[in-house]
């Protein structure tokens, strides 16, 4: 996380600490993705064994609706990408000059 001082814009963390924090975030993201892949595979395996949604819920801790949603697909659902219309750069005509985007 890059912590910038509000008054002078200087980074609170050193460059080395910024790089370490970025590496930690990347590692945590990859571990989380791997964990989701394992749970997704386990939910499908439990369903193939003939367990009901409620039984899968009890074993995995995920709500029945989540289990049902994940079983409908062959891949893990992802969050939709942010629409480019929501990004400030797409509204540069309306942003006053000198305002950083």
Image: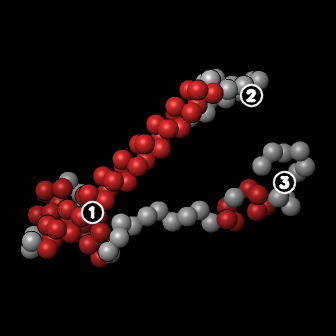
Q: Earlier in the sequence, mark 2 or mark 3?
A: 2
Q: CA distance from mark 1 to mark 2?
A: 43 Å
Q: CA distance from mark 3 to mark 1?
A: 44 Å
In the image, 26 versus 54, the foreground residue is 26
The nearer-to-camera label among 2 and 3 is 2
Answer whether labels 3 and 1 touch (C-beta < 8 Å).
no
Q: Earlier in the sequence, mark 1 or mark 2?
A: 2
Q: Quadrant of the N terminus?
A: top right
Q: CA distance from mark 2 to mark 3?
A: 22 Å
Q: Residue at x 47, y 44 (%)?
A: 26
| Residue at the spot of label 1 | 40
Can I make out residue 60 in this image? yes
Image spot of residue 25 (x, y percent): 47, 40
Image spot of residue 96 (x, y percent): 88, 51
In the image, 60 versus 74, the foreground residue is 74
Q: Residue at x 32, y 74 (%)?
A: 74
Residue 95 marker? 3
Mark 1 crowdedness (10 Å alpha carbons): few <14, some 14-19, many ≥20: some
Q: Residue at x 90, y 49 (%)?
A: 97
| Residue at the spot of label 2 | 9
State how many labels appear: 3
Residue 65, relative to residue 4: is it above or below?
below
Mark 2 crowdedness (10 Å alpha carbons): few <14, some 14-19, many ≥20: few
Q: Circle 2 — which element?
A: loop
Q: Circle 1 — which element?
A: helix
């Amino acid at each position: 996380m890059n912590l910038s001082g509000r008054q002078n814009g200087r980074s609170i963390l050193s460059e080395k600490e910024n790089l370490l924090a970025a590496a930690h975030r990347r590692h945590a993201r990859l571990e989380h993705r791997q964990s989701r892949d394992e749970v997704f595979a386990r939910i499908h395996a439990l369903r193939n064994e003939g367990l009901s949604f409620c039984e899968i819920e009890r074993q995995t801790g995920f709500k029945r609706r989540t289990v049902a949603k994940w079983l409908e697909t062959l891949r893990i659902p992802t969050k939709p990408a942010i629409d480019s219309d929501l990004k400030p750069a797409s509204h540069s005509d309306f942003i006053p000059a000198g305002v950083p985007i």
